[in-house]
Each structure stands twice: as structure tokens, then as C-alpha cells.
Amino acid sequence: MKKSIYLFALLCSSMVLAQTKTDSISLLPQSQLNAAQRLLSGNYASAVTVGAYGEMLYNQPEGDNGELDVQRLVLLFGYRFNEKTQFVTEVELEHVNEVFVEQAFVNYAVGDNISVRGGLMLVPMGIINEYHEPTTYNGTERPGVDNVIVPTTWREMGVGVTGRLNDLSLGYQAYIFNGFKSTQADGAGGVSGFLKGSNGLRSGRQKAIKSTVDSPTFSGKLDYYGIPGLRLGLSGYFGQTQAADDVEDVEGANIGIAMVGLDARYAYKRFTARGQFIHASLADTDKYNALTGKDLGSALQGFYIEGGYNLLPMSKKQKLFAFTRFEKYNTHASTAGTLVQNDAYNKTDVTTGLSYHIAPGVVVKGDYQFRSNASDTDTKNRLNFGIGIWY
């Protein structure tokens, strides 16, 4: 018994010593890091690094009961094998009862400004998919664009390179990934599909769960940071979906995807702003829908613009941002064949609220969302509150 207690105490003490150093989590776009980048940054006291981020939310649709949820808790672990080689992983617990591995990759620093990576990684598209820690964005919920157009959190297995061209103030990423899973045999002699009109490509994410790979996809991003306070991003994703072996040769089993994104983040004194535009063109959706009976659109498109202002003096360590975000997104931006556009998928959200950063790494949020769509379908407005942490 004493030996067990001793071993437990030794483990706990080693974990404490291995924690990342406490630092200020920057809200400036040019210096902002996400969780994986912080683990790789060298800001640690030992080879082992430990951290976490998470959020607890309350959602109250107009006229309905509210819902309380531990939306996610993500445990961060990293290990430095030597000065060039590191491993990063994120283990996510969703809604208390679901467990996923969100990232798990090896990073090898070939030089000062170039690294090779391989494993389970985030697809670099837009802002939120890479910077989704709750202290890095306004709003209790992530933007709708980053839910049904960019299927955050979007991660797949792959290999690639990342680095910076400092003379050009340019960051770059380029990866080869496995793609979305589109179809499989339904067990009754037919073919079932994963992709559909209501949430676009989201249900096709494979998340490294015995992922099917038929043809690789390409993903890349350029980030420009040469203007003080401003960060600009250009993203691209191109390839084919993946189908199960027994149906991959059936006409309509796969579709082609070409997705491009533009994003911008800006901060000046107490003012912040960000915006994002995403367009995805999908090929052969008419054949896919005929095969599976789904209603997948041939184009997905969305954008948002947001402005925020810190109501507290800059001399204060705490920050209180009042913000408003306007966004439009449509998973039936166009349709192919005989499929009629569903106006219920053409949505507009206006979110306004407060983000109170009571300490670096702790935020309390509250907002109200005015939600509508282009059809007569009733869409309920929603009141949201949340607590987010990241360390």
C-alpha cells in the first residue's frame, strides 16, 4: 500500500513539473498560437508537456428548455525526443460520454523555418478549424460557417510540410490527407451515403477511425503577417472522396471536392475584427444523389464578418469584448441535376454579446443569436452562456 501511494505521488509530482510554463495567451493575430503550436513552441520545463482546454455551455432556444453541457474537454500531451523531433496529441472528451483523438502527429524540424509532419492533423481551412480553443474567439458557439461549410473540427491522417518564409512575412502549410468518406454498401444490396444537404461534408469526416483511403487529397494554406496587427489567410483543399472497396467502382460512389477559403484577422489597440469566406465546389453530386437518395448540393458557400471592442482600459489585465458577428452560409448554394435548392439550408445568423477574459486562459461568454433562413421554416433565436479555459 505504501509503495502504491509513493508511486502515485511520484507520478503526480512529475506531471506538475512537466506542465507548460504559465504564459499570456495572446489575442493578437500575428503572435497567436493554437494548442499544438504552443506545445511545439519550446515553452516547457521538461521533455513532457501537459495542457488542456475545454468549455461548459448553456443554450436556451427561444420557447424551449435550456441545455447544460460540458461541450468538450481536450487533454494536451507533448513529448520532445530531441531538439528536432516532437510528438503532439490531443485527446477530446465530448459531452462527457464520447472520446476522440483530435490530433496525434510527429513534427520533425528539418531547419529553423521548415518542419515535416505526419499523423492525425488539422486541415488548414479558415480560422476556427485551427484556432478553436474557446479563449481565442468571440461567441459561445463556433460560427455556423465553421460547422456546416468547414466541418470543424476537421482532422484527417496525412503527411506534409509547414514553415515560414520570414523575408516575405509568409507562413505556409502543405499536406496530403485521406479524404471524406462518401459511400458504403448498405447491407441490402444498395449503397448508403454519408454526405447530405443539411450539413454538407460534415458526416463524411473519418477522424482516423479505421479510415478508408482510395485517392489522396491535397490541402494547403498561406498566411501573410507583414502588416502590424493584420493576418491574412488563403486556404485550399482539392481531391476526391473515399468509398468502401465494394462500392468504389459504382457510378456516383465518389464526388470531387475543390474548396477555397479567404480569412483575415485584425487587432488595433482595443479594436478587433475578423472575417472569412469559404466556397466549395462539388462534382458529380447528381450521380451521388441518384445512387444514395441524398440531397447533397453541388456548391457550399458561407462567410462572416465580426467586430469587437474591449470595453476596459488597455492598462487592465482583464479584457471585456463587446462583439457582433454577421454570417450567411448555404449548403445548397447551387444544386445539380433535378435537385431543387432547399431554402431552409440558406441561413443567416447575427450574434452579439460579451466575452470577459478574467485571466489569460479563462473566458466567460454570453451572447444572443438572431437566426433565420430563406424559407418559411421556423428557426428559433437562441441565448447562450459559457465558460472556456485553456492552459
Image: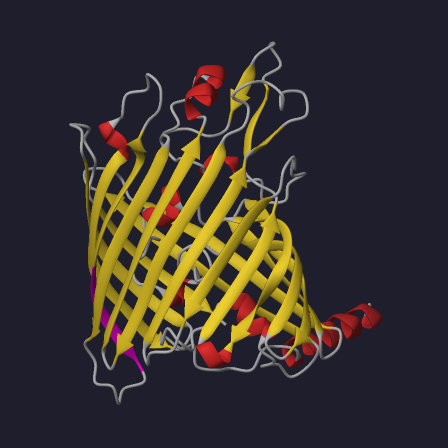
Residue in view at x 59 percent, y 18 percent: 250
Q: Position of residue 360 (x, y in %)?
A: 40, 77
Where is residue 184? Give x, y as percent.
59, 23
Q: Quadrant of the N terminus?
A: bottom right
Residue 168: name its quadrant: bottom left
Q: How many marks?
A: 0
Residue that sits furthest to the left in the current view: 376
- Compared across the picture, whether 129 is left or right of 231 comes to right
320 left or right of 81 in image: left
Residue 7 can be seen, yes or no: yes
Instruction: Return the x and y of residue 167 as percentages of the image width and height.
Output: 48, 81
Instruction: Point out the residue furthest to the top here.
Output: 189
x and y percentages locating residue 129 in the rendered image: 45, 55
Is 151 inside the magenta-drawn segment?
no
Residue at 53 percent of width and 73 percent of height: 164
Image position of 60 with respect to 167: above or below? above
Q: Main secondary structure of the magenta part?
A: strand
Which residue is at the far bottom?
315
Residue at 33% of width from left, 78% of height from top?
227
Q: Which residue occupies 24% across, 82% down?
A: 269
Does the stretch in magenta take in 320?
A: yes
Picture quarter containing residue 259? top left
The stretch in magenta equals 318-324
The answer to whether 122 is drawn above or below residue 202 in the figure is: below
